[in-house]
DNA sequence: GGGATTTGCCTAAACACATTAGGCAATTGC
DNA sequence: GCAATTGCCTAATGTGTTTAGGCAAATCCC
C-alpha cells in the first residue's frame, strides 16, 4: 500500500485550494480525503477535527496575506503605502476568495495571538507613520483603515458593487484619495 | 395529533432566534424541528431546503435592519443622521449577532433585488443629502460608508477591538467625527 | 541485514443532518 | 356529513464527522 504522504501542512494547503474552488464553508474533510485518494478516517491522524482543519487553513491565509502585505509596504510611505496595502487585501480576496473567507474565521484568543493576525495590525500602523497622528488617534485610524479595507473587499466580493455605475475600480481609487485626505486632516477631538 | 401550526414565516422567525442563540451557521433544519417538537421531514412542506430556510432568515434580518434604519433616520440630517444609522447597524449586530450574520448571506440576484437590501443603499444615500456631494462622488461615498459600517461592526463582533485600549466605543465616535469631516471636505478628483 | 518499534492508512461502526416518497389523520369547503 | 386538501408522520437514502482497532510500510538500531 503506497502511502499518500499526508501532513497537517499539506492538508491545510490543499484545503486552501479547495476553499478557493468551492468556497470556504464547503470545505469538508471528506472532500479533502477524496482529493488525496485516501479514506476519510486517515485524515484524522493529521488534523484533530473538521474545525481544526479550517483553523489551519485560516492560519495559512493570514500568513500569506501578511507576507504579501509586508512585501508591498517595503520601501513605500504615505499614500503610496496606503494604496499598496489596500490593494494587497483586495487582490488577494479576488484571487483567493476561499482563503480570504478563511482568514475571517473566528479564532480562539491563543490561536489568534500566535497567528499572523497581529502582523496585520502592525502593517496598518506602519502606514500611519507617513501621517501626523498621535495616540489615541493613531489607534482610531488603524481601526478605521481596517474596517474600510475589510468592509469594502467583503461587500465587493459579495457582489454589492457589481453591475452598477461607477465602476468599482474607480470607487476604490477615490476611497484611497479620501482616506489620504482624511489622514492628513484628521479632526481634533 | 395536534398540529404545530408551522408556516414559512414562523420558521424564519424561529430560525432567526436560533441563529442569535447558536450562531447563523449552526442553524439547522433538524434543530428547528426539535424546537417545534415536530419531525424533521415536516418542515420540508414549508421550506424547500436548508438553504431556503437560511435565505428566509436573511430576509427577515435585512428587513428588520432596514426598518430600524428608517426609524432612526426620520427627522435627522447631517452628522446626526450619520451617527444614528451607524448605531443602528452596530446595535443590531450586538443584540442579534446571528441575524446580522444572516444578513450577510449571499443572495441570488433576484432575491436580493426583492429584499430590503436596496433600502439600505437608499438610506445611506439619504444621509448624504446633508452634505454637498454630486455624482459620482455621492456613490463613492455611499460605498465608503457602507464599507466602514459593515467592516467595523464585523471586526468588532469578531473580537478584533476587545481587550485593547482605547475603548471601542471611543473609536466608534471618533470614526463618526472623521467621516463627517471627510464628507464635508471631500477631496476633488 | 533483520528484528522491533513506530507510523500511516485502512475497515468498521455510530451518530447527525438533509432530503425525498408515500401514508394517514385533521381540517376545510360545500 | 362527505370530499378534497393539508399537515405532520414513518421510512429510507445519501453525505459528512468522528472514534476504535488492525495490518502493513517505514524507520530505528544493533
Image (tube, coloured by chain):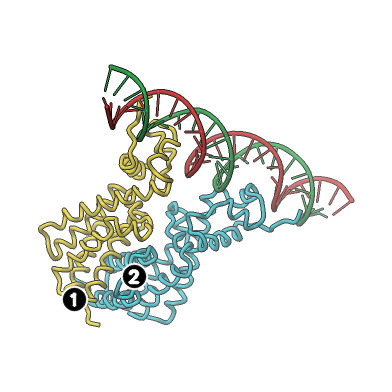
Chain colours: A yellow, B cyan, C green, D red
Q: Is residue D19 left or right of residue A142?
A: right
Q: What residue lies at 29% left-to-right and 57% top-to-bottom?
A: A114
Report x, y in % for residue B68.
Answer: 47, 73
Report x, y in % for residue A94.
Answer: 29, 50
- Residue A89 vs B82, above or below: the answer is above
| Mark 2 and mark 1: Cα distance apart in space | 20 Å
Of residue B37 and residue B84, the one placed in the foreground of this image is B37
Element carrying mark 2: loop
- Residue A149 vs A39, above or below: the answer is below
Report x, y in % for residue B93.
Answer: 44, 67
Q: Residue furthest left?
A: A75
Of residue A6 and residue A22, the one placed in the foreground of this image is A6
Total numbered badges shown on the rendered structure:
2
Mark 2 belongs to chain:
B
Q: Crowdedness of circle 2 by 10 Å Cα count: few (<14), some, many (20+)?
A: few
* The N terminus of chain A sits in image quarter: top left
Q: Crowdedness of circle 1 by 10 Å Cα count: few (<14), some, many (20+)?
A: few
Element carrying mark 1: loop
Quadrant in the rendering for residue A45: top left
Q: What residue lies at 41% left-to-right and 44% top-to-bottom?
A: A27
Q: Is residue C10 left or right of residue A133?
A: right
Would residue B142 be visible to someone looking at this image? no
Q: Which residue is mark 1?
A: A134
Q: Is residue C4 left or right of residue B45?
A: left
Would residue A12 be visible to someone looking at this image? yes
Of residue B154 and residue B184, the one placed in the foreground of this image is B154
Q: Which residue is mark 2?
A: B163
Q: What residue lies at 25% left-to-right and 82% top-to-bottom?
A: A189
Mark 1 belongs to chain:
A
Of residue B37 and residue B114, the one placed in the foreground of this image is B37
What is the number of the mark on residue A3?
none
Amino acid at each position: 500500500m503506497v502511502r499518500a504522504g499526508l501532513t497537517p501542512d499539506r492538508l491545510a494547503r490543499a484545503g486552501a485550494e479547495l476553499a478557493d474552488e468551492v468556497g470556504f464553508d464547503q470545505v469538508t474533510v471528506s472532500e479533502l480525503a477524496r482529493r488525496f485518494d485516501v479514506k476519510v478516517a486517515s485524515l484524522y491522524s493529521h488534523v484533530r477535527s473538521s474545525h481544526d482543519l479550517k483553523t489551519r487553513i485560516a492560519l495559512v491565509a493570514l500568513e500569506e496575506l501578511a507576507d504579501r502585505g509586508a512585501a508591498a509596504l517595503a520601501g513605500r510611505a504615505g499614500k503610496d503605502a496606503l494604496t499598496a496595502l489596500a490593494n494587497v487585501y483586495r487582490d488577494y480576496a479576488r484571487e483567493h476568495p476561499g482563503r480570504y473567507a478563511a482568514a475571517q474565521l473566528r479564532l480562539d484568543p491563543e490561536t489568534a495571538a500566535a497567528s499572523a493576525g497581529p502582523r496585520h495590525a502592525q502593517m496598518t500602523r506602519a502606514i500611519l507613520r507617513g501621517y501626523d497622528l498621535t495616540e489615541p488617534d493613531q489607534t482610531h485610524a488603524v481601526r478605521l483603515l481596517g474596517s474600510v479595507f475589510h468592509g469594502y473587499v467583503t461587500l465587493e466580493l459579495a457582489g454589492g458593487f457589481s453591475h452598477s455605475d461607477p465602476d468599482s475600480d474607480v470607487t476604490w481609487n477615490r476611497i484611497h484619495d479620501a482616506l489620504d485626505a482624511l489622514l492628513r486632516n484628521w479632526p481634533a477631538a
